[in-house]
Image (cartoon, rainbow, N blue to C red):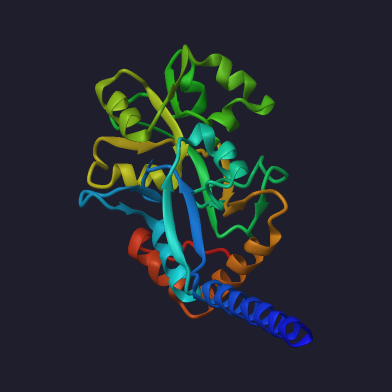
Amino acid sequence: MQLRKIAGIALLLLLTLMLACGCATQTAGDKKTLNLGFDAEFPPYGYLGEDGNYTGFDIDMAKALCERLGWELNLIPINWDSKDMELESGTIDCIWNGFTINGRETQYTWTDAYMDNSQVFVVRSDSDIKTFADLAGKIVAVQTESSAQAALEEEDNAALLASFSKFEKIGDYNTAFMELESGAVDAIAMDIGVARFQMTGREDMFKFLDDALVAEQYGIGFLLGNTALRDTVQAELMKMVGDGTFAKISNDWFGYDVCILGK
């Protein structure tokens, strides 16, 4: 009886050890996946390329970062209006997509800002609109839930917003530029980086107003409190700055180094 009891205990210990080893192997073999949420209609930061693959400056940055860390990158296009729900549900781990920190400082856990950006007004090149005052009585468009919309709805810009004949919210900038070109709207308020991208090859058709609506900075936003993942990403970003990876990707997309990390 005693021998049988000892044998049973030994068998139990062996099974426990095998299960433990199996779990450890599975855990060690798993590759961490970064689920990145982005607006697929926000060039040059994230969009669907002509080859049918997602591309963009921020996507290239994320690809390089994940490759360096040995992570898989899972690109998840999201409805921008639903970005908070996607983050809170765990569908995405972060929002990395020309994502403005200013005005959202307490809503997410952020990396340090990696890029300066400004909100500007774009008009047709033959437009008589030259200053903010000239926007009075005009139709002005923004992308829905964009930084430009938020800036124009701030109290400081209440008089400017009230001067427009119509404030139109459009789903994406491709559509906004088509409406601007056709004359359906008179101006678009938008990120200067996106505006430059949209105007490439069409510089004779559109122009910026001289004054910026507001200056802003881009960062990577994580669920509030997720400092562990933020710290890992932040540390690798700094390494990418140090060894020139950030500058190379930046030059590929913008023709100059947009990085403000550590500067």
Q: Residue at x 50, y 70 (%)?
A: 30
250 relative position to 32: left or right: left
| Res 238 seen here | yes
Count of residue discs? 0
Q: Nearer the viewer, residue 136 or 119?
A: 119
| Res 129 seen here | no
Q: Residue at x 64, y 80 (%)?
A: 17
Where in the figure is residue 184, as x and y percent of width and height? Answer: 31, 18
Residue 147 vertical placement versus 225 (above, below): above
Q: Residue furthest right?
A: 2
Q: Residue furthest bottom?
A: 3
Residue 235 vertical placement versus 197 (above, below): below
Residue 115 vertical placement versus 147 (above, below): below
Q: Nearer the viewer, residue 186 or 53?
A: 53
Q: Residue at x 68, y 64 (%)?
A: 228
Where in the figure is residue 99, as x and y percent of width and height? Answer: 53, 47
Q: Tell me the quarter of the image containing the N terminus.
A: bottom right
Q: Residue at x 65, y 54 (%)?
A: 110
4 relative position to 121: left or right: right
Quarter-of-image position of residue 202: top left
Q: Residue furthest front?
A: 1
Where in the figure is residue 233, as x and y percent of width and height? Answer: 58, 66
Where in the figure is residue 68, as x and y percent of width and height? Answer: 47, 75
Q: Tell me the quarter of the image containing the C terminus.
A: bottom right
Residue 183 vertical placement versus 243 (above, below): above
Quarter-of-image position of residue 176: top left
